[in-house]
Image (cartoon, rainbow, N blue to C red):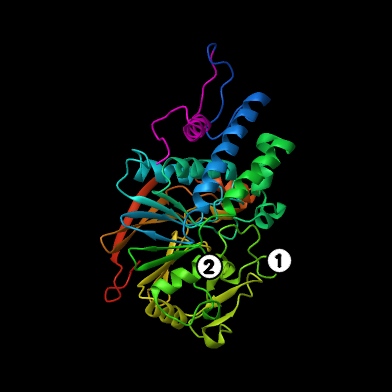
Amino acid sequence: EGQPFDLESAPNQLLEALKYFEAPIEASSRRGVGKEAYSWGYQPQAMMRALAGYVQSVAADVRRICAREPRCLHVPSPCYVLGDIHGNFHDLVAFEKALWRVGMGLSPAGFLFLGDYVDRGQFSVEVALYLIAHKALFPRKVLLLRGNHETRAQNSFAGYSPCLQQCCISLFGEEVGMSVWESINDVFDVLPLAAIIDRSVFCTHGGIPDPSLLSPIKTQEQLIKDIAAVPSHLPQPDPSGVGGSGLAWDLMWNDPAATESPEEGGCNGGFGPNTARGTAHVFTAEELDTFLNDYGLTHLVRAHEMRHTGFQVQHHARMVTLFSSSGYCGYANDASCILASEGKLRFIRLQHTSRPSKSSLSTRAAAASALEGGRKLESSAASSSPSSPILP
């Protein structure tokens, strides 16, 4: 583990900086100018350059850690699983205070994040710093998968308003901000693509891949080997470009078919073009059953799509779509996570008691902070065995 008790270490310095960012500070004669919660306030340029230096140092360490990890991780339970965060630092802190208040290092559970950490939310930089700092301190306990937004092409797209690149430049200035953005993407380049919890629950950001991208040998060990064959350094995963990977792209981008009927969904043979996204594929419930049965798996847990309650059980109750960012793009959705423990998947939801009007949000970025009202936790449990399917 990465020196969690060395308070002067770069990862701990980042976490201290984030505590400052999170807390409101009243103006006083001793402290001078105050600041609002979830803001950096006024900081001298030298201070922001120092923060950028810590980010780049920790990112370099985390890049080395993740590059050595298998492309498909073995994850023991108990484990918390979180879906898309999209720059919503408020909800990430809310999960922390509700579920691992004592700190990730002292929690009895591990942590698996399914990707899409950045873009669209106001605090993409802060979410990235939180995750890489904890990964540096607890590399075997904090596991980060790659989502479709963990690419330069995605997180530099200004239409996401704001994208990660815009957030970096806004916080650090053009020159330093671009350097920080590149350092964070250097980590994203080497993130694993999938994980299997207790040899039974397959986890990835998008969905199961087209079988033509896998070996004809249908064993779990071979599946892991197939994913392991994807290069650990993959700055450009799009298979339509040089050096891309069709398998990585499917794992990052695929969706379940919107209809249970293969013909209506355009899925001849279980897979069809993902016309909604203009790339990758959609897969049917029947194809998911085949994949899980072939590889000795019980369920798929994936992210990639917003759900009103933060999760949805689909495809013959063998798949969960998980979303961990509330108020996404102005919608009144909740954020949820999963606790995988003792052969069960327990759903934990941050339920907001005050919701914004979608029309009242001037930008999609405002959605990340619009639901700072009251929260309460709800949880439900369900068996992860095929004979006792997951229920919402």
Amino acid type, callout 1: Val
Q: Is residue 321 above or below residue 327?
A: below
Q: For this view, does 53 lie left or right of residue 37? A: right
Tell me the SS state at disc 2: loop
Q: For this view, does 143 lie left or right of residue 232? A: left
Residue 8 painted magenta: yes
Q: Position of residue 24 (x, y in %)?
A: 50, 28
Q: Nearer the viewer, residue 58 or 337?
A: 58
Number of callouts in the render? Answer: 2
Amino acid type, callout 2: Ala
Quick one: label 2, few (<14), some, or many (20+) residues within 10 Å?
few
When asked about the image quadrant of residue 150, the answer is bottom right
Q: Residue at x 38, y 31 (%)?
A: 5
Q: Position of residue 20 (x, y in %)?
A: 51, 29
Residue that mark 2 sits on:
229
Which residues are drawn in magenta?
A: 1-28
Q: For this view, does 37 lie left or right of residue 7? A: right
Q: Is residue 378 above or below residue 293?
A: above
Q: Nearer the viewer, residue 319 or 91?
A: 319
**Residue 370 showing in the rendered view:** no
**Residue 293 showing in the rendered view:** yes
When asked about the image quadrant of residue 263, the answer is bottom right
Q: For this view, does 153 lie left or right of residue 188? A: right
Sequence-wise, the earlier of marks 2 and 1 is 2
Residue that mark 1 sits on:
242
